[in-house]
Image: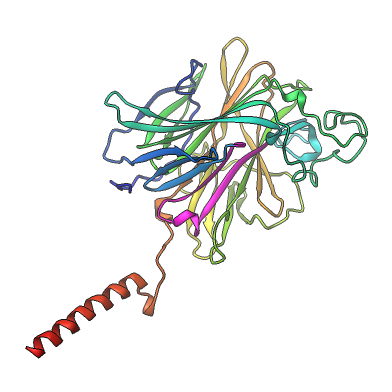
Amino acid sequence: MFLLVASVPLSHAFTLSEDDDSTETTTETESTHTETEHEHAIEEHRDNDGTAWIQTDIMTATLSPHMPTYQFWYTSDNNGSLARFMVSFRMIVEFEDTNGDGVYQPNETLAFAPLDAFEWSLQIGAITDASNKVTEVYASYTKGGMSSEWEDDWFEDWMPGLNETDDSPTFLADEGSNDYNFSRFSDMTLRFYGHVYTSDYNGNITDDQGTQGNYTVAGGMELKVDVEIGNFPFISNTSKVAVLNYLREDVASNDDSDHAFELHDDHGEVEVHSEDVSGEHGTHLADQDSDHDGNDDSVQQLSLVDDVTNVTQGLYSWLDKAIMTYLNGSQAAVDVDASYWTDGNGLLLFLAYPNFDGGSITHDPSMRLLETGVPSTGSTGFLGVPMEAIALIGIVAAIIIVAGFAIKRR
């Protein structure tokens, strides 16, 4: 059992930090834990099948051992039966931005690779301070070699050129073949490095020009992921790279629960559901002047909303800047753009980055639960009084009656 010490203020997570046990050059400076009473108990463990667990008093998350896939829910909600969400990194794409909108549409594809075409190693552990107190739990997915088993049917309906003999030889092994060949991505480096902190974590994002933004990771209720891409096999020197963030809002919920994605941009708010099927692939999600809670306008996000109560329970957020590292080691903050659609099973959110040929890119989306959205796990009875309270009243009444009979008999 975890002890909830105090609530944590609403904040958003973004960092471009190095792996805690690596020797890479960090892009974050003056990052500190907030030394206050706002601390959360945290633990991690692995199941026999390799599934990793991270649990705090607010948030429980599981990580698949097979590919970068995260499921998260409220710890007080048994197994996420009322509100359980999923984020899975499913694909990486090179595309030529032919219409100049900065985002990915399928007809702009030059080459792609589903991430389950690779083998993945998942490492998990805890970081402690000088007093041996745990301050962070980390979980790192690292891409390995090519996989011999992967699912190739989920993207066939909307990826262009897969069933055609056209001028897109990067899609198929040989012209006219139905066998996919993603070996050109075998030397690409790719890592998803996740962090959950026991207390609020503050830092700055910097490049060679100085500080480009500040961020706060909410302790105990937020899991942020550093996405690190290097040695990408670009076909074009004018192309871009997009990573598919595949989201589902009702993974293990019962039939009484229903959630929606609420998208925020300059044009207003749009509500979509996984079961919807978009008529258009690659709608541009415009930058937000400020997020819907009035915070930093560099934060882009979508909300996970209970469709019955209209309560926001979770957030999926990302910074509108990533850090590009050139071959000579210099760094620059670059724009990140987003496009999306739904395929009847989930929301496909593509985050797009500029060409970094010969260098690398680092960006960090974040998944978050809100304390104000904790679902009620107790059933209600007469006049809306919780059944647990009714049962307790009944027990007390029974004791009083028995005691009364005992006194009368005397």
Depth check: 298 or 23 in front? 23
Depth check: 52 or 10 in front? 52
Image location (x, y in percent) of residue 323: 56, 24
Depth check: 408 or 6 in front? 408
Residue 352 location, quadrant = top right
Boundaries of the magenta span: 66-91
Q: Residue at x 33, y 49 (%)?
A: 1
Confirm whether residue 386 shows in the render: no
Q: Residue furthest top?
A: 328
Q: Which residue lies furthest to the bottom in this view?
A: 409
Image location (x, y in percent) of residue 23: 48, 15
Residue 282 location, quadrant = top right
From what the image shows, is residue 341 above or below residue 89? Answer: below
Confirm whether residue 77 shows in the render: yes
Image location (x, y in percent) of residue 176: 93, 34
Is 331 placed left or right of 381 in the picture?
A: right
Image location (x, y in percent) of residue 24: 51, 16
Q: Is residue 89 magenta?
A: yes
Q: Which residue is drawn at 62% across and 27% down?
A: 143
